[in-house]
Structures are given as C-alpha cells and as structure tokens.
Image: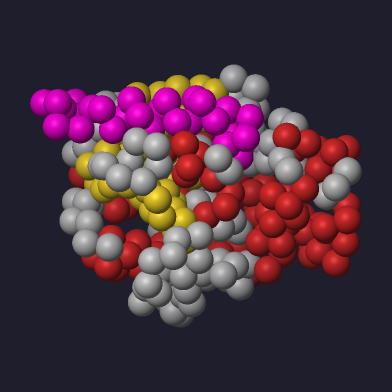
Amino acid sequence: MSDLPHYRTIADHYRAGRGEPVLLIHGFTATWRAWGEVPARLAQEYDVLAVTLPGHTDGPELPEGDSIPLLVDALEAMLDEVGWTDAHLVGFSLGGWLSLELAKRGRARTVTAVAPGGAETEHHDRESRRIRWLFARLHLGARMMLPLADDLCRRPRFRKLAMQDQMVDGSKLKPRESAAMIRAFATTPVFKRFLAEIGSSGAGLTELDQVKVPVTVLWGEKDRVLPERLHGSFFRRELPHATYRTMANAGHVPFWEATEAVVDGVRDTVSMAGAGFEPA
C-alpha cells in the first residue's frame, strides 16, 4: 500500500511507479488486491494507482442513490485528487463498465476492459438472474468459509475448489491471496444493494459511441461469470473500433493465470494513445 498522505476520496489502495498515469479499477466484491501481480508489473513502466471502490471492503463509503453514476463520480474525484485530468484506465468486470463510463466523460486516454460488465445480453432477464444467483451463492459460501479461511486456504485443493467459478486453477493463488479474496467477498458492505441492481430496468452501458479513445477488450476463454460468448457480442457491436483478445486457459479473474496477457494488453493499448487514433 502507498505511503502517500491520506486521501479524502481514496482509502485502501496501491500507488507506485513513474510515467504515463494508469488507473486500475477492480470488480464487484473485490478490492485493489484482486489484480494480483499486475499493479507491480505495470509500475515498472507507468505511474500506477489501483484503488478500492466505494462500498467495497476497506474502501470509502458509498452514498445512497444510483450506484453506477455515484461510483463514476467517486472515480472522477480520485482522478482530481491525484491531479490527473485523464489516465489510461484498466477496468475489470464492474471496473470495465466504470472505465467506459469515465471514457464517456472524457477522463480516459485509453481503456483496457477485462471481462467488462454492463452488457445488454440477448436473453437479458435470464442472464441477469443467473448472475444474481451466482453471486448470491458465492457470497453465502464466502461468509461460511470466513472464520476458517486462513487455515483452509493453506490447502491447494481447497483454493482450487473455492475459486473454481472465478479462475481455472485457484491453487495458483498464495494462501493469503485467496483468503483475502474470500474476506473481501464476504464483507462487501454494498453486496445486497448491488445484487438487487443487477439487470434492473435502465441499468447497463449505453451511448458507447461517445467513447473516442482506443479500447482493448480482454476476455478469459473460460470465464464462467461473464462468458464472452454471452456478453462479448454486445461490445463488438457497440464498440466496433475496439481491439478484442481472448486469453487462453484463463477465467474471470485472469491476473494470476494470464498475467503476461493482461500486462501486454495494457501496454499495447497505452501505445495507441496519441497515434492519430480515429474511432470507426
């Protein structure tokens, strides 16, 4: 964690490196730690800030109201606080959705979206019910595991089983990393609020023609939370100018299984900025 002075809007976070500004935005029920080795790897080349979202474990409070606009407002305040007019945005799941919303507000130099949320899928109501059920089941399991998480996570077979919906092989996590993910999932303050909002009327990404910067969309080929086969067609239709890459043998949380693919995706996207990019 950064040793910088306490921020007004930024709570638990990571800050390191020099160069082009890169903001990492995690997904629902996670914290900045869900990025694994990616922040430190990127900090070898860039000025990296990985934040914990409001309403999430060890993050700032999230006021009552429409969650997505409030989160985007909070992220804008974080950018203002560190003095960044814009940044290269890297968002995962919910964070991918938020990155695109920030891009619509003109706060992005580029966007790298990893398994982004916010898609209007072909069978939207049914898919929304599936996602709500999956998160409810995982949340219940995390709460049940929580008292024994540190001991259980010392066992590779348990880590693989516990993370099977999020990763291909959760045993690649270190015990403390898997315990931290379980703890974050179990203690997310806005869990019930967000769960109720999944698939709600009017929620989702719109007006993506307002995104005027280079975008790369990365997807794990074995994503079981937001499968590319169900969610990817929306982004290919709404963001035809984006670059699309599928990461082999990776799940919804690919940062341990496909670290190089994620870092390369960010690096290649950053390189597109200011190179005469014109969206189709």
Q: Provide residue 140's location: percent of width, then percent of height.
A: 79, 61
228 is within the stretch colored magenta: no
Asked if residue 121 can be seen in this view, the reply is no
Asked if residue 225 can be seen in this view, the reply is yes
What residue sits 55% from the left and 30% below the top? 259
Query: Foreground residue, 144 or 19?
Result: 19
262 is within the stretch colored magenta: yes
Q: Provide residue 185's location: percent of width, then percent of height.
A: 68, 60
Dividing the image into 4 quarters, which one contains the C terminus? top left
What residue sits 68% from the left and 41% below the top? 166
Residue stretch in magenta = 253-280
Q: Is residue 244 left or right of residue 178?
A: left
Q: Quadrant of residue 253?
A: top right
Residue most extreme to the top: 248
By what rule are the colours in the image chosen? secondary structure
Q: Is residue 38 left or right of residue 277?
A: right
Query: Foreground residue, 253 or 173?
Result: 173
**Vertical side of 204 occupied by 211: above or below:** above
What residue sits 60% from the left and 24% below the top? 221
Residue most extreme to the left: 276
What residue sits 58% from the left and 43% below the top? 36
Query: Foreground residue, 36 or 92?
Result: 36
Residue most extreme to the bottom: 64
Q: Provide residue 251's location: percent of width, then percent of height.
A: 64, 33
Q: Number of callouts in the render?
A: 0
**Vertical side of 202 occupied by 164: above or below:** above
Q: Provide residue 21's location: percent of width, then percent of height.
A: 28, 47
Q: Is residue 27 left or right of residue 80?
A: right
**Vertical side of 245 occupied by 112: above or below:** below
